[in-house]
Amino acid sequence: MNLSDYTSLFKITWRVARGTTPRLLWKFVRNFGLRNLRNMTSFERRMKKGEPFYPAFMMISVTERCNLACSGCWVTRGGKQSLTPEQLDGIISQSKSQGSYFFGILGGEPLMYRGLFDVIEKHPDCYFQIFTNATLITSEVAQRMQKLGNVTPLISIEGLRDESDRRRGRDNVYEQTLRGLRACREAKLIFGVAASICRSNFDELVSRKHLEDLAREGAAFMWYYIYRPVGADAHPENALSREQVRRLREFIVAERRNAPLIIIDVYWGADGRAICPGASGMSHHISPSGYVEFCPPLQMAMERLNADGSNLVEICQKSEFLAGLRKLAAETSRGCILMEDPERLADFLEKHGGFETTSRGTFLEELKKMRPVPGHDMKEEAIPERNPLYRMLQKRYFFGFGAYG
C-alpha cells in the first residue's frame, strides 16, 4: 500500500469505530472477521482435497412476504411462503457444524419474518447480515439489533427519490429508507448499503457523491451488485449494457483506493476475471419454501429441508443437482449463466427435473422467455484490482477454488 491507501483505510476504520460501541466492534471483529477467516481456510482446504462439500456461506431467504412491490424482483409478489423458526435454527446449527458462522438473511423483506431476532439470539457466536429495505426499521427495531450485537443491516437503496418510487412501486420509499438508516446510525450499529445497478439508476448511484452522502449518513460499506432481469416483472430493458458493466467495474476499482467507505463486490477476482459465487461453491441459498438452491434468483431445486433443517449438510454433500449446476455454470461462463445463457440453463433444469421453489409456479416459463443480457464476465477486457489490501483478500479468498480449471 502507498501512503494514500493507508490514510483512506485508517479514516474509514476510525469513523466506523467512533460511530459504534466497543461491544459491537468486538462482535464484528470476532464473529465476522476471525471466524470467517477460519471458515474460509477450512472451505479452501475441503475444496482442494476433494472432501465432502459444504459452501462457505449460506444465504437464507426467510420469507416471500414484502411490504414493497419492486420491479425486476425475483421474489413472488404477494407470496406467503416462509421457513419455520425450527428450520431457520436448524440451518444455522448445521452450518456451524461445518465451521460456517456467517449468514445472509434475505426475503422478501426479512423484517416481516416473525421470530427472526429470537432465532438470532440463540446464536450469539454467529454474524448475520440482514438484507432489508429499511422501511420497517424503527428506533425500537434498531435497538433490538444493537442489543443482539451480531447483526449488520444491509440497506437496499435502489435509486434516489424519483427512481426509488418508480422501482419500488410505492411513494416516499426513499425517505422511509433514510429514516430506517438513521435509526441504525443512532443505535450505533455497523451497517451498510446495497444497490442493484441497472440502466435507470446507474448515473445516480455509481457516483462519488453518492458514496460521500452514504458515508456522512454513517454507512460503513457499500455493496454493488448487478441487476438481474428475472421474475414475473423482469424488465430486461433495464439490464446494463456491456459498456456500463465495464464502467461499473472501472468505478469500483478506482474508488476503492480512497473512497470514504468500504466498497464490496463478489463478482471479480484480483486479476479482474469474473467469478460466480455459486459455481465456485462459495455460497448457496435456502428458499422460503425450504429448498436448497444454487443461488437466490435461480428458483428451482431438487432437495428440500426437513422439519428441523437437520438434513442440510447431507443435502449439500450428496446433491447431484447442485453439483451439476456448479459444473454447468463454471463450464458456461465465469460470469452469470442465468444472464448469459438462459436457454442452456433451462435445458438443464428440464432434463434433471428440478422443482419450482416459488409460490407463483412460473419460473421455468419466465426462464424460457429470457434472452441473453450482458453479465459481469469481461473476458479480455478484465480490469485488475488496484487496492493492495483488497487485491490480497481477493487472491486469498475469491479465486474460484478450482471451479474454472
Image: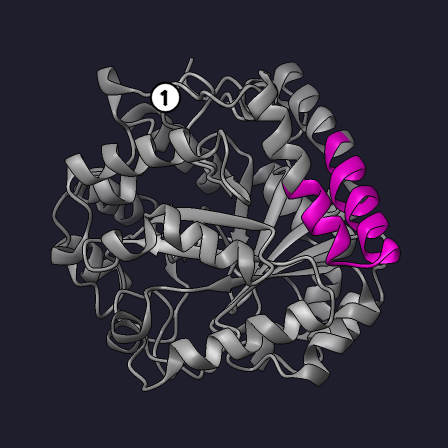
Residue 45 is situated, as x and y percent measured from the top left of the image, at 70, 19
- Above or below, 136 relative to 262: below
Nearest to the observer: residue 4 or residue 392: 4
Name the residue: 74% across, 60% down.
90
Colour mapping used in the image = one colour
Residue placed most toward the observer, 156 or 49: 156
Residue at 47%, 40% (x, y): give it: 322
282 versus 352 height, above or below: above
Answer left or right for 245 relative to 330.
left
* 232 falls in the magenta region: no
Q: Position of residue 194 (x, y in %)?
A: 46, 56
Magenta stretch mostly in which secondary structure?
A: helix
Q: How many marks?
A: 1
Q: Residues within 10 Å of mark 1 (few under 14, many from 20)?
A: many
- Is 140 in front, or is 285? 140
Residue at 73% x, 58% y: name it: 19
Label 1: state its secondary structure: loop
Specify whether residue 15 is painted magenta.
yes
Q: Position of residue 360 (x, y in %)?
A: 32, 75
Residue 236 sits in quarter: bottom left
Left/right of residue 312 with respect to residue 261 in the rendered view: right
State which region is magenta. 12-37
Location of the N terminus (image quadrant): top right
Q: Quadrant of the C terminus?
A: top left
Residue position for label 1: 273
Residue pictured at 38% horizontal, 58% vertical: 299
Residue 335 visible in the picture: yes
Image coordinates for residue 265, horizontal then vertical, percent:
46, 39
The answer to whether residue 297 shows anywhere in this view is: no
Q: Is residue 377 above or below residue 402?
A: below
Q: Amino acid at mark 1?
A: Arg
Q: Nearer the viewer, residue 139 or 124?
A: 139
